[in-house]
Image: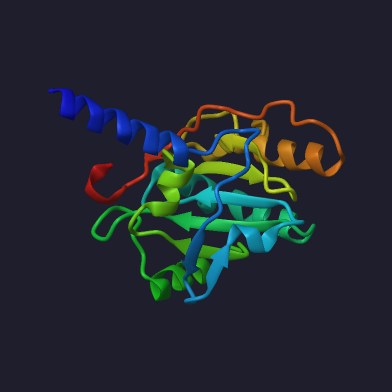
Amino acid sequence: MRRLCTLIALAALSLSAYSAKVGDPAPDFNATDSNGQTHKLSEYRGKFVVLEWTNNGCPYTRKHYSSGNMQSLQREWTTKGVVWLTVLSSAPGGQGYMTGPEENAYIQKVHADPTAALLDPTGTLGHEYDARTTPDMYVIDPNGKLIYAGAIDDHATTDPGDIAHSKNYVSDALTAAMSGQPVAVAYTRPYGCSVKYQGGN
């Protein structure tokens, strides 16, 4: 029993060590995108970075893509110099899992415009950030500090009609930070489908 308790405690400590917290340095990562290119967070020091967890089979994700809202956000902020990385942490066989060619075809089909789509089938990147839902959003400042984590907006529904009168936390965080102002709402509870991690964890 003592050994079991020790193992549980070590597992919890390990998880907390990799979970990103607002105000702390964002965990660096090494991930491969849908074109086979490697991306490291440290390569983007000096730029704002958005991480967007996605799953194209999730109705909460489809809400933002079928309406064009996510694509609009991607285009708006990347044209302002923000690096926007879409992350797919669905395990093989799970809802939302995509190979590189499949993800590229999907991006073209829905006219998405992220900087890159990172494939994370083992869930390593997702667990480093403690990503829980799709969508789940993170904003990192040019110094590598996490300044926002949580929901994309304040309407936790699958209805695209809610978008027009929603408060978009990601845009608000970027607007404030890029103007040198503090982020008023730095953390919210994310909503959506659970990330389909390998083994359900």
Which residue is painted at 65% across and 56% down in the image?
74
Which residue is painted at 42% across and 39% down in the image?
133
Report x, y in % for residue 58: 38, 46
Which residue is painted at 43% across and 34% down in the image?
16
Which residue is painted at 55% across and 34% down in the image?
151
Q: Is residue 115 above or below residue 156?
A: below
Quarter of the image for the N terminus: give it: top left
Examine the image and state in which quarter residue 155 appears.
Answer: top right
Report x, y in % for residue 5: 21, 25
Quarter of the image for the C terminus: give it: top left
Q: How many marks?
A: 0
Furthest residue toward left: 1
Furthest residue toward front: 2
Examine the image and state in which quarter residue 112 appears.
Answer: bottom right
| Horizontal relation, residue 183 to residue 91: left or right | right
* Residue situated in front as seen by the camera: 168 or 10: 10
Furthest residue toward right: 179
Report x, y in % for residue 78: 72, 59
Residue 5 can be seen, yes or no: yes
| Horizontal relation, residue 27 to residue 146: left or right | left
Examine the image and state in which quarter residue 3 appears.
Answer: top left
* Residue situated in front as seen by the camera: 191 or 68: 191
Residue 67 can be seen, yes or no: no
What coloring was used for the rendering? Answer: rainbow
Report x, y in % for residue 128: 45, 46
Q: Is residue 89 above or below residue 200?
A: below
* Residue situated in front as seen by the camera: 185 or 103: 185
